[in-house]
């Protein structure tokens, strides 16, 4: 099960004791700033959590698994996340 944006807004609202509407604005501003930084190529680093940036993927030939038909896939940029040390350790303790 995933944590949704509304769940995050609710958690921030409860923990910081601010109105849900203010919490929603905060989350939306953070997501917009992250998106803008990644899209522009600057990237974002949150110490201990991880880093976000964009990576270039070369064009290639793909195969449709249902039909076996070969298709050309254009080159593109994709978002990439590299987890930080603290996050990795925290995830591994959860096992």
Image: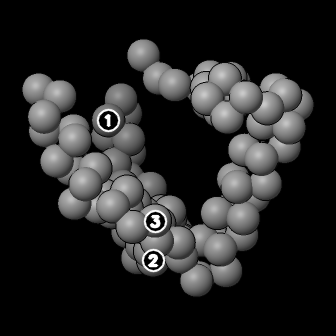
Residue 56 — which label? 2
Give the alpha-carbon distance from disc 2 to disc 3, as whole Å.
22 Å
* Residue 4: mark in rendering: none
Residue at which label 3 appears: 46
- Residue at image location 58% in from the left, 83% down from the top: 42
Answer whether residue 80 is visible to the viewer in this image: yes
What is the residue that sits farthest to the right in this orientation? 21
Please report whichever mark, 2 or 3, sits nearer to the chain's N-terminal start: 3
Q: Nearer the viewer, mark 2 or mark 3?
A: 3
Q: Secondary structure at mark 2?
A: strand
Which residue is denoted by mark 1 in the rendering? 65
Question: x, y (%) of residue 57?
Answer: 42, 72
Q: Is residue 50 left or right of residue 92?
A: right
Asked whether 76 or 90 is in front, the reply is 90
Residue 51: image location, x then y, percent: 41, 67
C-beta proximity under 8 Å, tags 3 and 1: no
The residue that appears at 46% across and 71% down in the rendered structure is 45
């Amino acid at each position: 099960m995933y944590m949704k944006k509304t769940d995050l807004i609710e958690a921030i609202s409860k923990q910081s004791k601010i109105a849900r509407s203010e919490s929603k604005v905060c989350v939306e501003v953070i997501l917009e700033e992250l998106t803008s930084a990644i899209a522009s190529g600057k990237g974002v680093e949150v110490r201990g959590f991880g880093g976000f940036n964009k990576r270039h993927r070369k064009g290639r030939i793909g195969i449709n698994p249902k039909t076996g038909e070969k298709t050309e896939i254009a080159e593109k940029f994709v978002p990439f996340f590299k987890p930080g040390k603290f996050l990795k350790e925290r995830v591994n303790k959860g096992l």
